[in-house]
Image (cartoon, rainbow, N blue to C red):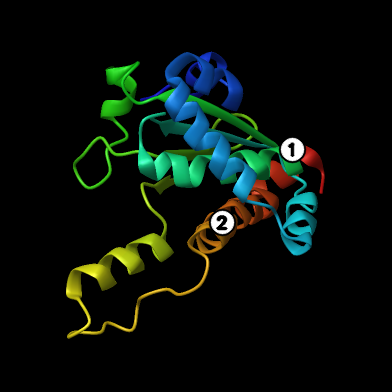
Amino acid sequence: MIDFASQFATALDYGAFLERFGSPEHQARWSNVFKQFQLTDDQRRLLGSFSREMNVLCLAGAWCGDCVSQCPILEHFARACPKIHLRFVDRDADPSFTEGLQICGGRRVPVVLFLSEDFAECARYGDRTLSRYRTMAGELTGAACPTGLMNSGDALAETAEDWLREFERVQLMLRVSARLRQKHGD
């Protein structure tokens, strides 16, 4: 069984993760995506409504294109919501930890672990969001075989909405948890 509290304690915040594991080129790519993305007022309101502490542990690689297009969004969420405590672990830094977090039989990133305030696992999400997989599926099948799944519009905004729905789902899970409601008397 994975000791999530210990892993979280040794994980790095966004800036420290990039400083330690990102080359200047990687750091610039993450910075560009971070600057491109802005939360909407509705997204800020939703994140501001969160009442339960969430520990969010992201297994990532500074070199990874999927991480570049998703992790800066997660950092925006954490900055907008003091209840979200976001930390990063490099995929290759601790093979014994990452081995247990495989997705579809591979060491993919990003993989996000949603943990309660006392580090009970609530959910895992990764490596790509639904909107990204729809785009990829549409590209594989080509124009001659439309799937009806291809997304349109701003891919970064669609990715953010996918992630935000998962953050909200876990927040609601934490909010209605009988164990946590008893603990907090609400």
Q: Given this view, does label 1 or label 2 mark the residue nearer the observer? A: 2
Kindly identify the residue that appears in the image at 19 percent across and 68 percent down: 140
Kindly identify the residue that appears in the image at 35 percent across and 16 percent down: 93
Q: Position of residue 34 (x, y in %)?
A: 60, 41
Left or right: 127 as drawn, with respect to 37:
left
Give the amino acid type for the residue marked by disc 2 in the picture. Ala
Can you say which quadrant of the picture contains the N terminus?
A: top left
Left or right: 87 as drawn, with respect to 26:
right
**Mark 2 Cα-neighbour bin, 10 Å: few <14, some 14–19, many ≥20:** many
**Mark 1 Cα-neighbour bin, 10 Å: few <14, some 14–19, many ≥20:** few
Quick one: SS at disc 1? helix
Q: Position of residue 27 (x, y in %)?
A: 50, 27
Q: Position of residue 104 (x, y in %)?
A: 22, 47
Q: Residue 160 — which label? A: 2
Say whether marks 1 and 2 touch (CB < 8 Å): no
Residue position marked by numbered label 1 in the rendering: 183
- Say which label, 1 or 2, has the lower sequence index: 2
Q: Judge whether 7 appears above or below 99 on screen.
A: above
Kindly identify the residue that appears in the image at 60 percent across and 23 percent down: 15
Quick one: SS at disc 2? helix
Q: Taking the image as drawn, is residue 49 in sight?
A: yes
Q: CA distance from mark 1 to mark 2?
A: 32 Å
Q: Judge whether 41 appears above or below 54 on screen.
A: below
Q: Decide which of 65, 104 is in the foreground and name it.
A: 65
Give the amino acid type for the residue marked by disc 1 in the picture. Lys
Q: Decide which of 31, 58 is in the foreground and name it.
A: 31
